[in-house]
Image: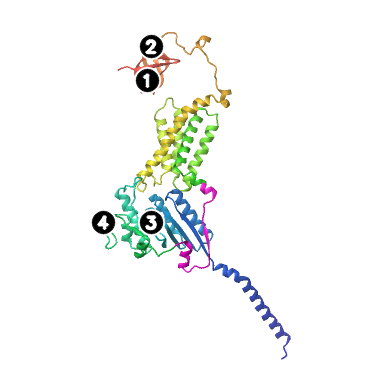
Amino acid sequence: MDYTYTEYYRLFLMSMRTLLLGIAFTISLPAMVLAQKKNIVVLEVKAEIDPRMTRYVQLGLAYADDVKADVVVIEMDTYGGGLTDAKDIVDALGNYKKPVWVFINSDAASAGALISLACDSIYMVSGASIGAATVVDGSGQPLPDKYQSYMRSIMRSTAEKHGRDPHIAEGMVDERIVIDSVKEEGRVITFSSSEAVRYGYCEGIVTSVDDILKRNGVTDYAVNHYELSVIDRIVNVFLNPFISGILILIILAGIYFEMQAPGLGFAGFAALVALILYLVPYYLTGLADNWEIIAFFVGVALIAVEIFVIPGFGVAGIAGIFVTLGALVLIMLNNDAFDFGLVSTVTILRALAVAVVGMLGSVILFFVGASRLTGSRSLSPIILDDTQSRAAGYTSSFLHESMVGKTGIAQTVLRPSGKILIDGQLYDAFTRGEYIEQGTPVEVIDEETTSLRVKSLPL
């Protein structure tokens, strides 16, 4: 059969098109196969539910988004932790768009049970448990009913959202609830693996993450265990209450020594570094609000005003100490302004203890460090260490006669130091610790160097 030139040209184009389509299909085939491979991200919740764990889960979910994970599996073994931290994790899970499965590899108690209910599917190993979500203090005693009511509400709504019996969820919190054939009054629900399957609180008993994937028909997959970066692990270290106490000690001691010797530099630098290491981790976890950080600097400013501007030590100094310490405590607490409704008493007391221990440690450092500081080689050029004794002709007394027993008027407020007026002459004076108003009659009871010790006289 004879073909014209045009027909040969058309046959050539059809052949080339077929060849190119075949090449394109061959090249794209590995990519198509690869696209079918499921990307699984595993997060490990195997410690107390606290701000460090909350940050880990939030960063893990963000990482899963970045790598376009098909499924997130939370491998859990925890006895619980802070209610507010658990609620933050539940909210993060609620905002995540892809499926989240939890693998209870032993225990999911208290806050762990709440987090498990927030997952799309629950799987457990044989012998695991879930429940016992009563809110308790550090000694294991139930907290007041306002905490239990809030926990019941969260457990109920979270269970309903994922198609689980809300009454059972409440029964994990409240021992007063009675559920026929499930729970009697006087105890809270803690399900074993088989009981959880029976009552719809577990999709199946498994042995591993691979077993979970196999049950869900996922055969071609890559498992990626998420781990914190070095920087994030360092941030978690500084969220430890013990480390926070040490940082508070350095902050307060550094501020004190810098104010005593403004040109020293090292004390102020140490306080600044400690302050950064204290604030940044709490700020990154959402615990430190802007107003709490501002309150801290306001407190420091009040202390500085009292030391450098206002004579003596009065309202500004005391207020500065309370504001500074209060801000350091509030930074550690997950409060909403001054609403501590979701913060347990134990958490508040622990934060107070950390701050107080840090303050007491800084006071000890003041006394120990001050004596060592004056004898240090670095400060010897600016410290006068010669003794100016009376035998060598030195005297600190400016008085030409004894003033003991003389009376006068407080020219300024004495708190405890100030000025008094005797026979028309001004003198520096101080009290034994009491506060004396301006204009109050006073009597000299002792002479010390350049000042007179006085006491108030009745009007």
In-front residue for pair 35/263: 35
The secondary element bearing badge 2 is classed as: loop
Q: Which residue is mark 2?
A: 404
**Residue 2 sits above or below residue 291 on the image:** below
The answer for how far apart the CA atoms under marks 1 and 3 are is 61 Å
The secondary element bearing badge 4 is classed as: loop
Q: Which residue is mark 4?
A: 185
The answer for how far apart the CA atoms under marks 1 and 4 are is 65 Å
Type of residue at label 2?
Val
Image quadrant assignment for residue 330: top left
Q: Residues in magenta?
A: 207-233
How far from the left and from the top, in percent, is residue 84? 39, 50
How far from the left and from the top, in percent, is residue 18? 65, 79
Counting other residues with Cα less than 10 Å from the Cα at mark 1, is it few (<14), some (14-19), or many (20 or more)?
Answer: few
Q: Which residue sits furthest bottom?
A: 1
The answer for how far apart the CA atoms under marks 3 and 4 are is 20 Å
Type of residue at label 1?
Arg
The answer for how far apart the CA atoms under marks 2 and 1 are is 15 Å
**Is residue 83 located in the magenta-colored stretch of the structure?**
no
- Quarter of the image containing the N terminus? bottom right
Between discs 2 and 1, the one toward the N terminus: 2
Residue drawn at x 48%, y 52% is 56
Image quadrant assignment for residue 377: top right
Q: Which residue is mark 3?
A: 113
Q: Which residue sits furthest top?
A: 401
